[in-house]
Each structure stands twice: as C-alpha cells, then as structure tokens.
Image (cartoon, helix red, strand yellow):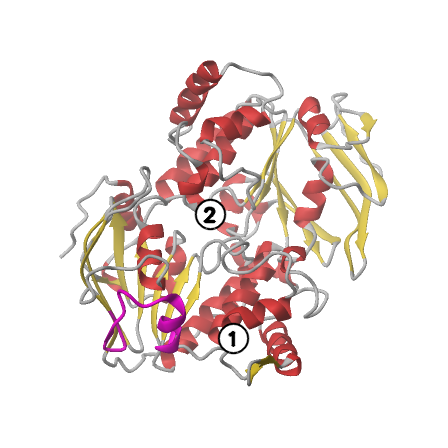
Amino acid sequence: MEFEQENKEPFRLVLENISKSYPLIKANNAISLQVKPGEIHAILGENGAGKSTLMKILYGVIKPDEGSILWEGQKVEINNPAFARKLGIGMIFQHFALFESLTVLENIWLSMDEKYSLKQLEEEVLKTSAYYGLPINPKRMLHSMSVGERQRVEIVRCLLQKPKLLIMDEPTSVLTPQAVQILFKTIRQLASEGCSILYISHKLDEIRQLCDSATVLRSGKVTGYANPKNETAKTLATLMIGSELPIIQQQPAEIGKPMLEVLGLNLKTSDPFGTELKDICLKVRAGEIVGIAGISGNGQKELIQALSGESLIADTQTIYMNDAPVGKLSPAKRRELGLCFVPEDRLGRGAVPNLSLAENALLTGYSEGMVRNGWIHQPTINKFAEKIIEQFNVICGGKNVSASSLSGGNLQKFIVGREISLKPKIMLVAQPTWGVDVGASMVIRQSLLNLRQQGVAILVISEELEELMMISDQLTVIANGKLSSLIPTNQTSIEELGLMMSGDATIQVP
C-alpha cells in the first residue's frame, strides 16, 4: 500500500505490509498504517489481534518477517530499542520493563541514552513527574510499588526522552478520572508541539475523546480505519470484535450470610514505602459483590496480602472466612475454606511465565482431581485447561503453550477462568480486566455476576471505576490505608469516587 499526503511534509511514520509469524499463529498479516506529525492515532483490536506485536516491531524489540518502515520519509530498519529511541520513538509498555531490585531513579537512569548524574536526573524526575501530575519518589525501591505506581515510572521515564513519536499501551488503566484528564491534557500538549502518539486502549470513550484517527486490527489484519470522533463506543466495539458487544445481564441475587469479615484490621508493613492498614472493617455476604476503589499505593497491596494469606495476622479474631478465623492460616488453608484469588500481577503471581497453561492450571486447581494418590493426573489437568480456554475464548496455541506467550488480556482471561472454574465460596479479585479488550471485559464481568447469582461472596479491587459501578452492589474507597464506609452503588457516581480517591473529598460517606 502506498500513502500520499497533500502537503510536502512527509508522514512521521508509514508501515507497509508488516508481517510477523510464530509457530502457531500469524500475529501480523500485511499491516499498513500512516501517522502524521502531531497526530493522535489509536490502534484498536481485541486481545491477540496483533497490536502489541506491531508496536514491538516499531520499537525494535522484535523484527518483522516482511514489510517496511518509513520514518520521516526514509526507509529504516529498527533493530533494537536503542535505535528506536535515537530516531525519537518512545514506548510505554503494558507489561513493565523494570528491575525490581533497583530504585525508581536507577531504573530511569539505566534507560537514558543521554547520561545524567544521578543528582541531575533526580531533579528532572521530580520536575517532570510533578508537571504531568504523576508524582513518584525517585528513591523508592521498585519491588515495593504497586502496578499503578510502576506505570507512573514508565510514563515519566519515557517522557524524559522527549520523543517524536510516543507509543502508549493502556496508559490510563490505573488512573482516576481526574488524573486521566490531566494525562490527556499532557498528550494534547505533546501533539500540539508535533509529537505523534500511537495510543492503544480498550476504553473506547477515551479513544473517542482523545484520538484523531484509528486503525482497527482483527486476527492480525487491518479490518478498517475510522475517525473515532465520528463513531460511538458501540460502533467502535463492533469494528473491533466483528459483532455486537455483549450486554451485561444483572439480576437480583439472594443475599446470604457474611462469608468474609474483617474486624478492625491494623497492619504495619515492613516495607519502608508501604502503606499501613488502619482499622479496616469490611463485610462481604454470600450473593454480593463489594467493590473497592482507590489510587494505587493506598493500601490495596497490603490488604490483598492480608486477605489472601501472603501476610499472616497475629490477631486471629480479625479476619474470618466462612465463619472461621483465618489470620494465621496459609493461602492453601484459606483455599480449603473456599477462597479463590486473582492477583493484580498476572505474570509472576497469577501465573508462572515459563510454565504451560496446563501446568499453571495445576498450581491452584490441584484439588480438582489433578493429583491422585500423590501422582499428577495429566488427562484431568489437560481437560481442565482446555475447558478454560474454550469457555473464556482464550486466544492461544493450546494448553501446552507457555503463559508468557499469551497477550496480557488472554492470560488474564485464563487466570480468571481458572479461579472461577474452581467453584469458590469467596472470590478475591484484583484488577479483573486490566488490559483486557472490551468484549473480553464483558465476558469476565458477566462471569463474576454469574458467580454472585450462585451465592458466591465476591470482593473486587479495581481502579476501573466504570467496572465497579457496573458490577458492584456496594462500594468503598481505600485511601491512606483506610476504608470508607460502604455505600450502595446506586447512591454514588464515578466523579464522586474519583474525588474521594484523590483526597479532594471526605473519605467517610453516610
């Protein structure tokens, strides 16, 4: 495909017939697109459509099998990220490229092609992060940070490079509505100064609000181009998935007894940058979904660890599951009481990257007949994994592929499907649809609602406020290690929750 532009200024970027194949899948199939200077261009598609592969080709992480890249009118071969950055291409990855054993400042310093002294760089980090409304502590250890805080590091690190083209993969997934608008202001300012933006997001209202143009991918191919401002979220979703968007079916559930109770939980953290939990009180009943909203780093990680059993509690009378005190019980013992758990960090905690999907099914599903008389029963494991792949439409090369080979959204579908298939009595879910496309998000949300109908007590911790409003019966906000009182979902709004999360409104609600 050849592109022509009316004025003499060349396109910032032209991709022509880019293809990339793997043993079991053709990730990109003759993809072509064009991006002008100062244009905010969306890349739309389901999980597994080929978006991440295409962006990694552009950033020099992987090489295409076929096709060409034109940068400012000149054909280039981008063999590595260093060359991409030299051209002026920056990328914020959905899965972070950070070293957990280093500080924020050290992580950023390692990525800078123009070397600063650490003192100079610290000043730049503080100034840049404050300017963009994404405050970070340069001296903080990366391993102590939540997913949302790590994303801030990625964004600031990339902006320090002053890119001509910025690739943003799900940049608002852990931001409040107010913070999203601040980021959008920054993006528009960058675009007005001539920086091109390639924007990947499953939040279609964001695409419509922000982007000038869009390329739609499906199964590795370009299936259309659109001006998002002339489309509705519904028509964009139809372009992405090739059919009507699933509609959430929510019916009243019969509320049962409390299945999860937290009674005055106080928890200090050994992490000097962690958040102390203060007098946490919470009750989740059978047949009920309780949602917890909050900006990353306000105690979500510590609360999840206390509930899942990763952090043990000395006071055994603080946390109850199914009427049993569990403060000193291990994660395995809590699972025996009916707890299932979807962590926010899918690679490393939700799944072992180098193990197959079948082996990852065994990690938490061992009680489902997968181990018999001390022996692993492979046929049962295979059947269980295949059932998850089919029911949750996990796009992959089969049960034997590694977890790391899946796109983020497809791995999330597999992990959520695994835990749901274990027939929980209590379900703890952190960031259930982070980085998941709109169609798959609806499937996951409907699955949680179906669990609720079956009498399961579900606690959802999410920064997707629309998601919480859609599925929760009651909501609370966590800020500075404290929980607000519960409020029925129909008595609040996304804007109010966003203000509470950011500390611009009182935490306690009547």
Residue at 48% x, 49% y is 205
Nearest to the observer: residue 274 or residue 291: 274
In the image: residue 431, left or right of residue 72:
left
Residue 473: x and y in percent read 29, 68
User: How many residues crowd mark 2 within 10 Å: few (<14), some (14–19), many (20+)?
Assistant: many
Helix, strand or loop at label 2? It is loop
Q: Amino acid at mark 1?
A: Gly
Nearest to the observer: residue 166 or residue 380: 380
Magenta stretch bounds: 320-339
Helix, strand or loop at label 1? It is helix
Q: Is residue 135 magenta?
A: no
Which badge, 2 or 1, is on the more N-terminal residue?
2
- 448 in relation to 52, above or below: below
Residue 141: x and y in percent read 42, 35
- 274 in relation to 443, above or below: above
Q: Amino acid at mark 2?
A: Ser
- 334 in relation to 439, above or below: below
What residue is disc 2 on? 173
Q: Quadrant of residue 192?
A: top right
Residue at 61% x, 69% y is 359
